[in-house]
Amino acid sequence: MLAVLRRKRQTRRYQRSVYLLPSMFTVGTLFCGYACIVFAMGGEYATAAKFIGVATVLDVLDGRIARLAGAASKFGGEFDSLADVISFGVAPAVLVFAWGLEGRLGLAVGFLYLTATALRLARFNVQSENPDKRYFVGMPSPAAAGVLVATVFAWPDGFGIPQAPVVALAVVIVPALMMVSRIRFRAFGALTLRPRSSFLVLLQFALLIAAIAVQPERVLFVMAYSYLASGPIGFVVGRLRKPPTARRGGSGGHSTTELPTRKPGDTMGIPNIARRPSRTGSA
């Protein structure tokens, strides 16, 4: 009897620890967003950008661990969304505003990005089961934040050109629009690897890590903007590949095929049925 009670206690402790583990990663994501804001206010833009990169990794691990351990819960989902709003909405907006945006227009654009992030996360939460797990509808908020922080990480001292404020506005506006759009972006977490291709994927991943270690600014910049461009490019290519629909002639989509005219006395194969005289006026 005592052994059974001990096993139940151990099982409960294990379940609590399993459910707590994903939330610990979420707390780490939340801290990274807070640290990004603090360092951005201090003018250390490159350091602030690194914290968003760490937050992205923690956010991916959070969801993975929750699914693998069967620890997904409504509380965890809501907590994760709130952390994402801060780490991938508030923090990047504050970072980019302190780095390159100016005046009231910059303040408005930063708020636009924050609003787009919140809308993107809210839409993701209320969506029912996605029919195609291979794609996201709209750019994911961590990827959009990655575009902003990759730009800051590559040019921590600014672009150094007279048009720098205009370029900074575009850097913020384009990812914001992609988040609230209906354009599909590839979900790499849903990719299934074949046993034969696993070795090749591992080799490519090793080369990517080596490239990031050698030139982190350039490689991360290219990765972020390549993913940003993949959505619109895929949308255009998909539209071009669709076969043209058969167009009907005439206005209003009605066919212009002429019907045979009926001559007097010609029944055209229709039985001669006596008809009641039609009424005139409205019924």
Image: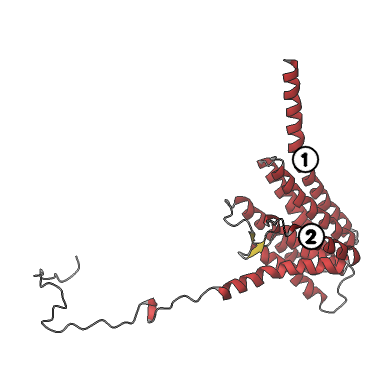
Which of the numbered marks, if any, corresponds to residue 241?
none
Which quarter of the picture shows residue 209? bottom right
Q: Where is mark 2, residue-wise?
A: 92
Which quarter of the picture shows residue 24? top right
Q: Where is mark 1, residue-wise?
A: 21
Answer above or below: position of 190 versus 69.
below
Quadrant location of the N terminus?
top right
Residue drawn at (76%, 29%) of the image: 13
Image x and y of residue 204, in percent: 80, 63
Residue 231 visible at all: yes
Image x and y of residue 247, in percent: 43, 78
What is the residue that sits farthest to the front in this orientation? Answer: 196
Residue 101 visible at all: no
Dot 2 falls on a residue whose secondary structure is helix
Residue drawn at (59%, 71%) of the image: 238
Say few, some or many: other residues with alpha carbon within 10 Å of mark 1 (under 14 / 14 to 19 / 20 or more). Answer: some
Label 1 is placed on what type of residue? Leu
Q: Is residue 239 left or right of residue 228?
A: left
Whichever of labels 2 and 1 marks the residue nearer the N terminus, that label is 1
Answer above or below: position of 27 versus 41.
above
Quadrant location of the C terminus?
bottom left
Mark 2–mark 1 CB contact (< 8 Å): no
